[in-house]
Image (cartoon, rainbow, N blue to C red):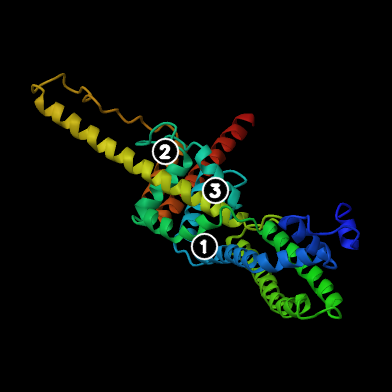
Amino acid sequence: TEMLAPYLSGAEPTAKLDGAEKFLLEMCKVGGLRQRLTCWLTMLTFETRCHDLQAQLQAISAGVKCVRTSQSTPQLLALVLALGNVLNAGSARAGAKGFRLEVLLKLAETKATVTEGDDAGVSLLHHAAKCAVAKWPDVRKRFEAEMLPLSDVSNVKSALVVADIQVLAAELGAVEREYPQHEATRSGSDRFFEVMKPWSVTAKKLLTKLQAEVQTMKEELKALAAYLGDKILPDEPEQVMVRINAFNVSFCKACRDNERAEHLRKKQEKAEAERAARRPSGGAPGATPKGKVPVKAVRSTKDHYMNRIQGSLRRGEFDQMKALQAQMKTEIEGKIGARRASIAGRQK
């Protein structure tokens, strides 16, 4: 501006300036140029940014809806709860009515108790997947399809959406404060006021609608957390859906792992049967066939019942599982009582 000052005052002729310099000279003659350009930039980008934010809000709303209407989600959460109560039988944590969703992320890290027919080191998640498929054969495909909208929510942060809307509100406020100052100077060549006034009215309506959708989003996320029995995080309320989505991905992977393991087991059994058919008849009487592992005898009441309880859980027989739990408790309490009576008798 300092370099163009002589030309603006008329002290220097403008004929020797090139096209770009003449354009810059004319721009400097416009009053409130910086404020006008800021307003024009807001106007040019406002609608696109609003639509981008609306798409994110709609993705969150669709994610909430898919979890609330899912048939598989409550079934699987109930199964995980039942499995946890079986494993915690006899402890202070037995008989729980619910659990925090963060537990779902730890299932793959927890190793299940090894029982007859189980492979050593199998995770609790794979065990839960096996129980679920035994009870609901189509659960993997159904759960995967129901949770499909959650894939669009994984990268959406509600706090960032709210912050972006606040930025839009601040920019629109700056426009509303600026354009009235140019009402007195409007002319045929200066239409800033005439353009900005009606646009600001339309933009205000769009922003108000967006703010209402944000409030709806917050209420939906709060209701979803209550529906799932979890606590909502003030800064990241969408974490409820993120955890469900993570469980969906890991659960479906565990189901596919189990399918591959079962296919391999059947393939090995078939190969072993074919080898056995080719062997000469005979062999040591009472010998254990090759490839077969004798089942160990159950030596204690608790081990006996836990094997049967976990077998019922794998088969999805929850009523039988509860009956076995009650029997185990009664028998153990009876043995403890008898032992205490015996000790008391010897002390007399």
* Residue with the mark numbered 1: 67
Compared to 332, does 142 lie above or below? below
Say the numbered circle drawn on residue 271. none
Residue at the image position 59 percent from the left and 32 percent from the top: 343
Marks 2 and 3 in Cβ contact (< 8 Å): no
Say the numbered circle drawn on residue 304. 2
Label 1, secondary structure: give it. helix
Nearest the viewer among 345 and 70 is 70
* Residue with the mark numbered 3: 104
Residue 256 at x, y percent in the picture: 37, 44
Label 3, secondary structure: give it. helix
Residue 254, located in which quarter of the rendered image? top left
Q: Which mark is nearer the camera, 1 or 2?
A: 1
Compared to 258, does 202 lie above or below? below
Question: Which image quadrant: the C terminus?
Answer: top right
Q: Amino acid at mark 2?
A: His
Nearest the viewer among 60 and 89 is 60
Label 2, secondary structure: give it. helix
Nearest the viewer among 230 and 37 is 37
Q: Amino acid at mark 3?
A: Leu
Which is nearer the N-term, disc 1 or disc 3?
Answer: 1
Which is nearer the N-term, disc 2 or disc 3?
Answer: 3
Residue at the image position 38 percent from the left and 44 percent from the top: 311
Gap between marks 2 and 3, in whole Å? 29 Å
Question: Which image quadrant: the N terminus?
Answer: bottom right
User: Given the current orientation, which residue lies at the most extreme top position?
Assistant: 284
Nearest the viewer among 10 and 86 is 10
Residue at the image position 44 percent from the left and 61 percent from the top: 146
Residue 306 lies left or right of residue 348; in this view the side is left
Q: Amino acid at mark 1?
A: Val
Q: Crowding at label 1, few (<14), some or many (≥20) Cα neighbours within 10 Å?
A: many
